[in-house]
Image (tube, rainbow, N blue to C red):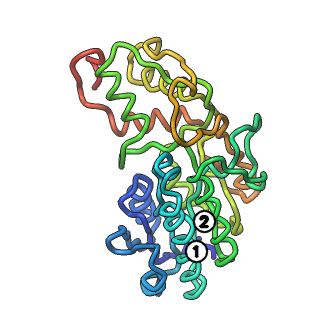
Amino acid sequence: MNATNTFLRVLLTGAGGMLARDLVPALAAAGHHVTPARRTELDVTDPVRCDEVVAGYDLVINTAAWTAVDEAETHEAQAFAVNATGAANLATAAAHHGAALVQLSTDYVFDGQATEPYAAEHPTAPRSAYGRTKLAGEWAIRALCPESWVVRTAWLYGAGGPNFVTTMIRLAAERETLSVVDDQVGQPTSTVDVADLIVRLVAGPAAYGIYHATASGRTSWHGFARAIFDTLGLDPDRVHPTTTAAFPRPAPRPAFSVLSHDTLTTAGVTPIDDWRSGLARHLAAHPPPREHGPGAGLD
């Protein structure tokens, strides 16, 4: 499917999520007719309902997901039902009705131990329940719906939900100093930029396949936090480095989450620009309110 100069009927699942909230206006601005579907309107684990709802659409974008990474360690069956079976249900329905499909996925499908950016075709080796269920969803999509794009992203932040940026802004107002891990490296990525990339991806000329929707460049969580403080005019030295071991979690976090954009470049689709630019745009569009306390002076 090539959406250039074509207005598509788009079904967007997981419409209550952070990315979906930026996809709706991005798709509408491109001239597409978008129907956002929350879980109450479309439970992706119900195959009959998926088939009923998908009928009549040209494109399905699946952002519905179990994203509670730590909870998935003890609720893998429930996570699998959404991330894998749900994806399979949508893929089956899309193929049945002749619709194309965009499936959102994650850096957690990799082992997180690389030292160079992960290519789209790099062998997958998830180390968490969340990663396993998302990878199963990728397999289902590619097996059941040939007209599909798998779009992996990572380190997302946006105005539509809680995220690292909002957490740092809150902590800046509450604490004199804070400690942030510096042994996990990735690509902080704005949901606005991912939404824009998906719109451009489905417009062509990209072939169906796997693509990485992350910002360019790389940093650690510590570096990201310092950049947030610096952009807001706060002293970045208030942010101290620490290690992952200091904050043990049920699910292992990837030490290296940098994804390659080679398939985008080969397809003639411009990757998202540097993560610092995305952060600056986000904070300019969504400045934090003025606070009192240690972070006084935030505007």
Residue 138: x %, y % from top left: 64, 64
**Residue 114 position (above or below residue 160):** above
- Labels 2 and 1: the sequence-earlier one: 1
**Residue 34 position (above or below residue 233):** below
Q: Amino acid at mark 2?
A: Gly
Given contact means CB atoms under 8 Å apart, are the residues at marks 2 and 1 in contact?
yes
Look at 56% across and 36% down and name the residue there: 275
Q: Amino acid at mark 1?
A: Ala
Q: Quadrant of residue 3?
A: bottom right
Residue 288: x %, y % from top left: 30, 31
The image's mark for residue 137 is 2
Q: Which residue is mark 1?
A: 88
Q: Is residue 41 left or right of residue 109?
A: left
Foreground pick, 195 / 148: 148
Residue 121: x %, y % from top left: 77, 55
Q: How many marks?
A: 2
Foreground pick, 95 / 180: 180
SS of the residue under disc 2: helix
